[in-house]
Amino acid sequence: MKGPAPGVEELRELLRQGRRTPSELVAEVLRRARAWEPHLGAFQELVTSPPEPQGASDGLLWGIPYALKANIAQRGHRLDCESRLLAGHVAPYDATVQSRLEGAGAVCVGRTRMDEFAMGSSGEWATSGSTANPWDPDRVPGGSSSGSAAAVGAGVLPFALGSDTGGSIRQPAAFCGCVGLKPTWGRVSRYGLVAFASSLDQIGPLTRTVRDAALVSSTLMGFDPRDATTLRDSPEKEGEDLDALLAGLERGLEGTTVGVPWDLLAGRLSEEVEIEFRRVLGEMEARGARLVELRLPLARHALAVYAVVANAEASSNLARFDGLRWGRTAAGADHRESIRRARAEGFGEEVKLRILLGTFVLSAGYHEAYYQRAQRIRRAMAREADEALGHCDVLAWPTTGETAFGRGERLDDPLHMYDSDFLTVQANLTGLPAIALPTGLSREGLPFSLQLTGRRWGEWELLRVARQVELFCDFERHRASLGPGGDAS
Ligand code: GLN
């Protein structure tokens, strides 16, 4: 059992040739998880007996093991979002993404840790315990999809799902050396995802390769009658002609226009991240891409706008957790006292901070000054990005301004913590699809990541450009030496 688990494509081939059975694959994942978990802490739950895949063996993901982030409903399993407030809550139904994956024959083997209610950038706000970065146990894996990114980055399993409200798929993907895709808002059903900020939330895959991200997201994407915000008429015929769509990913970079907003990046990148970014851009250019410099003056306000919009929506979404209907109950003299106590004892500090900020920006007298204004800037920001993508095929910048930071380093410094989302929140505010992919390792052996943002509903074109970058970066070679506890076992 040397090296990481094979990726989705490779496993499909092994299964197709009959060289592996689904239960063997699950057993391998569990063996890897056992070796890694003492160092990693990526899972809140792992299966004990391997479930059998559903459907016929020609299902797109038949027999492929995966894990779900702890805020995605899976019938009969805990759905606590790593919050004491939801301790003991069991999901009564499956999220649509879970039904779709199961319907394609994939096998869920566990649930991954996350920051409480998906609020965080380091995986440290989890009640079941924090998660380490597979490349360096003293660094954070990023967040909030911390466990999904760490498990996939370590090669414990071929893919996992995450959710992304302000970067929670892409930023941990960047820190852990995974591919992470946030689809266009409305492309993947959010039915069964515990809402954080509904106008920003999207579910997406964390994988090892871009082609694997394409395979998994083709299963996730599509209209869902249970989520009225999903797009009814897909620009591509989903499910149909997948082979042609996958073949399209192999088209080279000739004639591809890549927009780079250097004004946004000035002073925001560490020296090594900037050097790596320039190297990757140079390689893209050498392969026929045309680089154009553009300005996105509004994007620099993305973090401030996000802080208003995300917290406002969170305060409203989290109002339902009253300790009466779900999870933790607390005894009080009356109704109000019970609710107050359940929320005071159940929510963690970071979640309370967000609820307070969100309630403040929505309160009478401040609503116009903060919330309405943020909404106006948000709309203008979306126009600005759509316009830029009118003359570029993709926008490019690093996923994060730095590599993974140290564990414990930012727990007392929320503003510094939020800062690591500076380059990811724009895609949520604009609704555009964005992908993070690993490009190389720093001197300290930590992954670098490139982020590409595509046109609305333009996932396949985005995946194509990412695939072409992946080909010359060949990041997989680095993972071969990764082992539990830092040794190459
Ligand atoms: N890290 C960001 C936050 O803390 C994004 C979270 C997310 O995307 N769920 O809000």
Image (tube, rainbow, N blue to C red):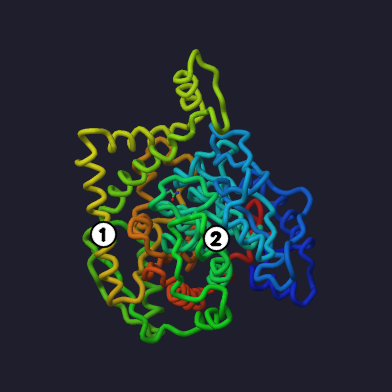
Residue at the disc numbered 2: 206
Residue at the disc numbered 1: 381
**Residue 163 visible, this angle:** yes
| Residue 105 in picture, x, y percent from top left | 69, 64
- Label 1 or label 2, whichever comes before in sequence order: 2
* Quadrant of the rendering where the C terminus is positioned: bottom right
**Which amino acid does the dot numbered 2 rest on?**
Leu
Q: Are marks 1 and 2 in contact (CB under 8 Å)?
A: no
**Residue 40 visible, this angle:** no
**Of 371 and 32, the residue lying toward us:** 371
Distance between mark 1 and mark 2 Cα atoms: 27 Å
* Quadrant of the rendering where the N terminus is positioned: bottom right
**Of 44 and 379, the residue lying toward us:** 379
Would you identify the image quadrant in which residue 294 lies?
bottom left
Q: Measured along the vertical axis of the image, is residue 319 above or below residue 5?
A: above
In the structure shown, which secondary structural element does the residue marked by tag 2 occupy? strand
Q: Residues within 10 Å of mark 1 (few under 14, many from 20)?
A: many
Task: Give the residue at x 49% y 33%.
Answer: 321
Task: Give the residue at x 26% y 57%.
Answer: 379
Front position among marks 1 and 2:
1
Task: Give the residue at x 52% y 28%.
Answer: 323
In the structure shown, which secondary structural element does the residue marked by tag 1 occupy? helix
Image-based side of 483 in relation to 435, left or right: right
